[in-house]
Image (spheres, grey):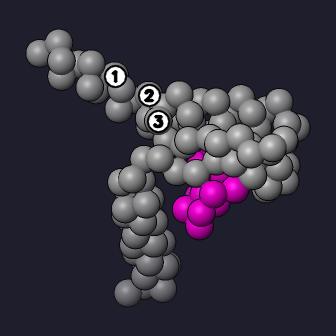
Amino acid sequence: MTTNRQYIAEQAKIFKALGHPSRLLMVDALRDGEKCVCELQALVGDDMSTVSRHLSVLREAGIVAAEKRGTNIYYRLSLCCLEKFLSCTCDVIEKRIQTQISLLNGK
């Protein structure tokens, strides 16, 4: 039973890390391939210390991995099943929107 609770706690850590819009925006961008931290900073629009803190949370949760090359740090997704999970959540949202549109149109 304790092991199950430990797994659940680790899963919660992953979901919590994905629960911030800026972090989710960065993760979504990384679906297309690795990005330099400067690209992620420009995408999010926050100061570099805030972006670094977000990336640290994602790294600690095992969602992203980092590699330093020269003066730049590049990030990539390291949670292999995340692509499928994000696609699934997009499908759920799309179905919800279609249902709402149908209700508004009286269908």
Residue 13 - label: 2
Q: Position of residue 96 (x, y in %)?
A: 42, 68
Q: Can you tell which of label 3 and label 2 is closer to the viewer? A: 3
Question: Image quarter for residue 6?
Answer: top left
Question: Image quarter for residue 53?
Answer: top right
- Give the magenta part as a residue range: 23-35
Q: Residue sitting at 74 percent across and 45 percent down?
A: 69
Q: Is residue 99 above or below residue 83?
A: below
Asked whether the viewer can see residue 89, the reply is no
Asked whether the viewer can see residue 10, the reply is yes
Q: Residue sitting at 71 percent across and 40 percent down?
A: 68
Q: Crowding near pointer 2: few (<14 within 10 Å), some, many (20+)?
A: some
Task: Pick the quarter of the image with the N terminus.
Answer: top left
Circle 1 sits in a helix, a strand or a loop, which is it?
A: helix
Q: Can you tell which of label 1 and label 3 is closer to the viewer? A: 3
Which amino acid, mark 3? Gly
Asked if the residue under mark 3 is in contact with the one under mark 1, i.e. CB atoms within 8 Å, the reply is no
Sequence-earlier tag: 1 or 3:
1
Task: Pick the quarter of the image with the C terminus.
Answer: bottom left
Check residue 22 for magenta coloring. no
Per the model, the C-alpha gap separating discs 3 and 2 is 9 Å
Question: Image quarter for residue 94?
Answer: bottom left
Which amino acid, mark 1? Ala
- Considering depth in this image, is 9 or 49 the residue closer to the camera? 49
